[in-house]
Image: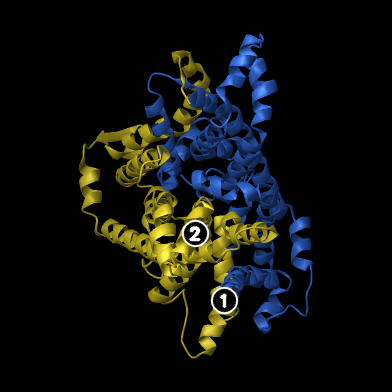
Amino acid sequence: MEKWENNKAWFLILPVFIIVAFSSIIPLMTVVNYSIQDIWGPGQSVFVGTEWFREMLANKRLHDALWRQFLFSGLVLLIEMPLGILIALAMPKKGWKVSACLVIIALPLLIPWNTIGTIWIIFTRPDIGLFGAAINNLGIAFDHTARPLDAWITLMLMEVWHWTPLVTLLAYAGLRAIPEVYYQAAKIDGASAWATFRYIQLPKMRGVLTIAVLLRFMDSFLIYAEPFVLTGGGPGNSTTFLSIYLVKIALLQFDLGPGGAFSLIYFLIVLLFSYLFYQVLQRAGKGEKV
Amino acid sequence: MKANKKTIGLLIYFGLIALPIYWMLNMSLRTNASILGSFVLFPFDATLRNYIKIFTDASWYMGYVNSMIYVTINVLISLSVALPAAYAFSRYRFLGDKHVFFWLLTNRMAPVAVFALPFFQLYSTLGLLDTHLAVALAHCLFNVPLAVWILEGFMSGVPKEIDETAFIDGYSFPRFFVTIFIPLIRAGVGVTAFFCFMFSWVELLLARTLTVTNAKPIGAIMTRTISATGLDYGLLSAAGILTIVPGALVIWFVRNHLAKGFALGRV
């Protein structure tokens, strides 16, 4: 659609601009302000330049949290993408069953994030949880509050349970957009189910799957509430992800300077990925191959 | 044969989705003594005591009321500022339009944890701390960009000729916008409201940081219970089940738009 050229349109976006500026630019400037000063009381501060940045960049615990975060996001993608596609392929193609399936599949996405954590605490506790008790009855000791590996397994199960539906919904939307003639042509050629998937469905889903990969990466990279409720970052620091560590520094210890520097580093990493994401989406929107 | 295998696989998956939720439902219908005393797969000694406690104890049910209030304020603010902006993005080319759009999106993707501390400082300076408005405004950080994006998508599907015809017929812009244009995209407005509702409803970190007692959301009340010693699993489960209900109710209305909304919504 050809758009009208008119700079007065700025008046229409002014309210959005003001409200987002209020909740984004001012707080970000505050963070910048913290990150270059040493503040030890109201009105008492001294300019320290890049000291906090150097301190945070050399901080071993920040490095650990960052690698943990990448490992977590990587595992999330490796498990959720194939699983989500598989479920989308198994879904019915028309009729009331589609609506029913969609509603059931979307259910975990609509549960508040702290409730998700609560559900999984109750589900996996070794004494009262169905899952925890079942595993322990099999003779395998399982306790996510005491053993890091168990905490990770629980978190991954929760994450897969919570967010695979998103991949499924996107993949399903992609599959429904493939014209029926493609399948007819494949049938005439006598293509196997695998060949149909590999040479028709997968390439046609490339756009939505790219979106799914990036969304899942971003969301898992920002995860806070679920591990906060489920493990509180422990046992030890084994599930302390970036957001959890940042909140620890900024809100619990109230270290404004290091917290500010950390915030900006974190934000820049995310910004880098969002730029990449935007580029991909722009190209997908123009109908080019991504 | 092959179709059967698919159906069985799907049913198993649905079972796995439902199992943890069922377990919480099971716990919510039992007393704490019963939960800790015996391990049963089905709540034979079912009681509504936990639910009655939540509905009669103000420190519990006010959590739901508080959450509802700030979510509603947030949806209203988000929609009212996003509607004209989305129209501008869908109809006009103007100086810096692409950059502003990208800037909005970066806020959608901002790590919420980054904003917790400055929001706390900002709202305490303004005297807004522990009010519903503070949480509602804070959630605009991610909901306004989301609303703009979803609405823009729906608006771009409306042909521009409708606008032109209306203006030729002598409609002023505000009158055209409210009486003709918004009714045309009411499905989009509904979907947008739904997703703003959802993302404000599921968020915990900002809501918890910006409230102390008066506007404390249910999520924060629940986490407080977890940190206490000797926690009541039955009560906690009942509270959790009640937080699922609103989402489960409204999901039916947007089932045909779910995939599209989530594709755009989590940006």
Q: Look at mark 2 in the image and give the residue it sits on.
A: A183
Q: Which residue of the protein is positioned furthest toward the bottom in this rendering?
A: A139
Q: Secondary structure at mark 2?
A: helix
Q: Could you tell me which residue is drawn at 39 percent across and 55 percent down?
A: A203
Q: Secondary structure at mark 1?
A: helix
Q: Which chain is blue?
A: B
Q: Is residue A16 above or below residue A247?
A: above
Q: Could you tell me which residue is drawn at 66 percent across and 83 percent down?
A: B39
> Picture coordinates of residue A7 (x, y %)?
44, 14
Instruction: Inspect the image, locate mark 1, and give the three-letter code of the amino acid beneath it.
Output: Lys
> Picture coordinates of residue B78 (x, y %)?
58, 33
Front residue of B6 and B53 = B6
Instruction: Inspect the image, locate mark 2, and give the three-letter code of the amino acid beneath it.
Output: Tyr
Front residue of B157 and B135 = B157
Label count reads: 2
> Picture coordinates of residue A284 (x, y %)?
39, 42
- Chain for numbered disc 2: A
Query: Disc 2 versus disc 1: distance between alpha carbons?
Result: 20 Å
Q: Is residue B247 above or below residue B38?
A: above
